[in-house]
Each structure stands twice: as C-alpha cells, then as structure tokens.
Image (spheres, rainbow, N blue to C red):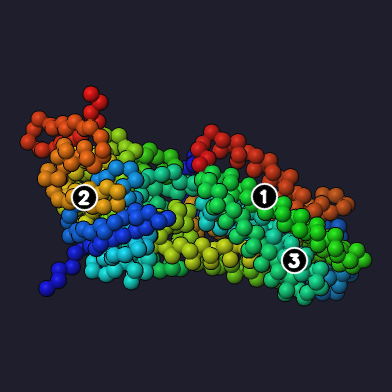
Amino acid sequence: MVVTRAIEIDNLCFRRAERLVLDSVSFALDAGELLVLLGPNGAGKSTLVHCLLGLAAPERGHVRALGDDLRSLTRREIAKRIAYVPQSGHSAFAFTLEQMVLMGRSAHIDGAGSPSAEDRDIARRAMIDAGVDHLRKKAFTQISGGERQLALIARALAQDAPIIVMDEPTSSLDLGNQGRVLDLMRKLAANGKSVIMTTHLPDQAFNLKARVALLRDGRMIAEGPAEAICDLSAMSRLYAAPLRRLTDDGAKGVVAFVPDLS
Amino acid sequence: MKFWRAPPAADAETHGLLLALVAALVALALASLAIGRYPLSLETIADILLGRDIDAPGRATAETILFLVRLPRIATAIMIGAGLSLAGAAYQTVFRNPMASPALLGVSAGAGFGASLALLLHLPTLAVEAAAFCGGLAAVAASYLAARSTRSHSLLTLVLCGMVMSALFQALISLVKYVADPVDTLATITFWLMGSLAKANAADAATAAAPTVLGGAILFALRWRIALLALGDHEAAALGADVARLRAMVILCATAMTAATVCVAGIVGWVGLLVPHIARMLFGMEPGRAMIATATMGALFVLGVDDVARSASIIEIPLGVMTAVIGAPFFLFLVTRARGEQWS
C-alpha cells in the first residue's frame, strides 16, 4: 500500500537561464514533521521554496501535496493545502494586522465573496495563538519586524493548511522574537502540521529537534536528524568556511556554529 | 514603504462618517440643481421634481434647464468622479504603488489619443469610445512593461514611465490635431479634449455611467481578492489568487472606466490620485468600505469642483484646470511626506 505523505518532492530540477538551480532534489515530509532547510546564499533555497508553493514550475520532477501533483491543482486548492510565510517585508499599504490575517482566509472564500463571521472567528483565534491579538487594530506598517513576522504566521494559521512553508522566518528578528517564532513552529508541528523552513542558523534545527536538509549548488547533499547531519566538518563544507562548534552546558543538546576567525 | 502612519479610525466611527459622506453627496447633487447662470430656486426645482404647480410662469424653460442641462451634467460629474477615483484606487492596488493614477500612468493621454484618432477618421461614437479604451490600454501596458524592464523597485519608476508615455501620447495627439482638417475636425478634437462638462447631455451621462457602474460592480464583487494583489504576486498567489487573470481583469475595468471619463470630459487629472489617498487615510484598507468611500468622495469632489467651475466666473473654468490646481500641490505633499521613508 502506498502511504500518502503530506508533501513529497521527487527528483525536482529547475533551470534558470541555462543554469541548473535545483538538481534532482527529493525529500518527503509527514504530518507533524519539521524540516529545516540549510544552505549557503545562492544554494537554491528560495527557488525550492517557490517550487514547493507552485509559484515556479520545475523543469523535471514533481511536488505532491497530500498525494496530488501541484500542477493538477488550482491556486485555491494549493492554498488550502500549503500556507506560505514570507520574510516580513515592507507593505506599501497600511492594512491593519487583522485585515492581513483575514486575507489568509482567501482560499476558503468564493471569488466574489467576503469573509464570513466564521472566517473572522478563525482569524481571531489565529491571532490569539500567534500572540498578536492585542495588535489587531494596528496598521501593519506601524508594528515591529518581529510582530509582523508573528502576524504573517497568524495569517498562515488562518489559512488552515496542513503544510506550512516558511522562508527565513527569523532572519531579521532579535533573539527574543526568534524564540517566539521557533516556539510557535514547534507547537504547530505538535498539532500535526508539516512545517518546512529555511534558515541560516543550524542551531535552530537542534533547538527544534528537527530534521535537516542540506542544500548546496542546487543539490541535496545530506538529510536526516540535526544531531546526525550537522557536525563541524559537514557545516564547514556546506558554508565553505572555517567554523567553530559551540555547545550549551545542559542536556538539551543545542549546538551552534560560529565563524572561526583565527 | 509607509504611507499613512495614522491608524485607521475605529469601525463605528467610520460607519457614521461614511453615511455622512453619502448624505452630503445627495445634498450637494440636489443643491447643484439650483446652481447656474439661470436662476432656479430650490422651490421651483421641488415643484418640477414632484410634478406640482404645472402652470407656473416659466415652467417650460425651467424644465428644459433642469432635465436637459443640469441633471445630465450633475449625473456626469458624479460618474466621472466615482469612475476616476475607483480606477485610481484599482491601479494603485494592482501596481502596489500609491502614486499610480489614470493620468500618471498615461492612461488618460492614451485614451485621448485613441479617441482623437477615431474622430480624425470620422468614426461613429461607439468606435471613438472603443478607440479611447484601446489607447488607454496600450498606454498602461507600455508604462507597466517599461517600468518592469528597468528592474527597479522604486515606486517613482512606474510614475516616471507613465509620464513618458503620457508625453508620448500627448505628442501623438498634437500630430493628429496637426493633420486634422482645421475647418471641422480640428475644432471637434480640440473641444473634446479640453475636458468640460458644459455640454454634457443625457448621452454623455450614459457613456460615463455604463463602464463606471459595470466596472465598479466587478471591482466591488472581487474586492477581497483584489486586495491580495497589494501584497505582491507571490504572496497573493500563495494565498490562492489567480494573479495574472485577476490583474488583467482589474486593469481592463479601470482602463474602461478611465476611457469613458476621457470620452465625456477629456483629460481630467489628479482625481484618481488624490481621492483614493484621502479615502484610505480616513477609512483604512477594509476593501468594501474603502471602495464605497473612494467612489463617494470622488463624486463629491468632481461635482463640487464642477459647481465652482460653472458658477465662480462668467466664463467657465475647465474642470481639468481646477483639479490640477488642487491636485498638484497635494502630489508634492505626498512626495515630501514619503521622502523620509524608504522608497524602494
């Protein structure tokens, strides 16, 4: 019997201007699993994220969400299965945080419809879960980067999709906000969501006890539990730089890597 | 980029304000019936509208002025104001650019060129309108593609490309005028482009109303989906929007609305830039409320400006001149306000 994975990437290839940006990338994720995607700048992480969302069409290979190839699904059907948390950028328009989160319900609203009372309830719950409910009347342009990121996660929660893809969700956040975002991700996985995130910080994978996939020059060079994959030599090779490995004093097994300047 | 720092006012507060605006529009429309060179008292107007006192002296003249001159003009002004404002708001959303507007994107000039070319060829009215629409569409497509090909993320790039297109189409309009027969066609084109509601009749009102009402209805029906486009293509698509089709639909509607206003009133600038900004400032981004506010305030603005234009002096002041005098300083205000913020 074939078991349907939450999301399954099979032999994915993507070419941009003659260059193979993704070369035969394959992995799969079940419900409740967390996958941390590590790789140096230009490794193809963003392209992979775009392929995962169906925003970029692969040259070869498949992305399947709950068993169906994304190419066979409409945008709305994809949005009901996969939610996207972008890096919190600037917005030209001052939507309130509440309106922003409500837009997560779009896939569940008919073309000419507007959000129902139920949609507003769901959005409200998502804001409470993400800890941004007290900011709901604030303009998106007025809140901090960390608050924006949490709000975008709230929007993905409101979207109510079993798969959540996050593109460097912690890249511009201070340590406190990083912790808040990671904690939220852990809870999401515990509630049965499949979460894929890209990051430049391997310690986050240890912290989340997540699976790790290493992407370099468009190829997946290793995949597995963080403690098995992310040793000093693998990380130094991945980032092509001398690194130092730091461990904490307790039993939590969090490992961090910093550039070695000596 | 942050445009408005002020948080949108509380919901209950804006509901009252919106109702007040609609009431103000109705009141101004009625009052406008009494404004003009020929004195018509509100009492006479009420008598005519309610069918009372049919044998009063001067009744026939009063009826003619009311139904054939003032009513069509007022209806046309309302439709032009609402149409240009809604088109401006739509362009601003799909291009994610608070500086976009029918005039600044070159749509108005493109539509003017299309229409003057059709007039030069002595085409029938419907063909003139279709030509205006095609010209407008060509202009907005050219502005958008030119801005995109620069790969610049600055908001001013699109405005700059729009101004280039606008200048180009203005030059083409001059060319059409140059080759036009000075005895009849030239005068027609010139008057037509000058943009005045002085000769607005029932047909003009219908020309302005049909695309405005139809386009406005489509934009209103899709308002929650269109709002997604303001977030950018990737986010909108990931939230379930069919971005390419939705954008094409919005641009078609906004351009049809703009072209219709150009067909009736010539090139009236600034309304489509000014009004959506004030509407957003007062009512926030909630799609339904923002649209109703934009349409109402646009109608109020153009109707008010036209009332001044036809009553302030013995000679009528062209509508486009009045809106520019108010709109241009406002645009500068926006630019200076945004200067401290990131533009890209």
Q: Residue furthest top?
A: A262
Residue B64 at x, y percent in the picture:
83, 70
Other-residue count near label 1 (Cα within 10 Å), few / some / many at <14 / 14–19 / ≥20: some
Number of the label disc, if any, that sits on residue B115: 3
Q: Which residue corresponds to mark 2?
A: A221
- Decide which of B14, A28 is in the foreground and name it: A28
In the image, residue B170 above or below residue B205: above
Q: Which residue corresponds to mark 1?
A: B163
Q: Secondary structure at mark 3?
A: helix
- Decide which of A220, A89 is in the foreground and name it: A220
In the image, residue B300 above or below residue A148: below
Residue B81, quarter of picture: bottom right
Residue at left 56%, top 58%?
B90
Query: Label 2: chain?
Result: A
User: Looking at the image, is mark 2 or mark 1 nearer the viewer?
Assistant: 2
Residue at left 43%, top 68%?
A111
Query: Label 1: chain?
Result: B
Q: Secondary structure at mark 1?
A: helix
Residue A245 at x, y percent in the picture:
16, 32
Which amino acid type corresponds to the residue marked 1 in the rendered image? Answer: Met
Query: Label 3: chain?
Result: B
Mark found first going from the N terminus, 3 or 1: 3
Other-residue count near label 3 (Cα within 10 Å), few / some / many at <14 / 14–19 / ≥20: many
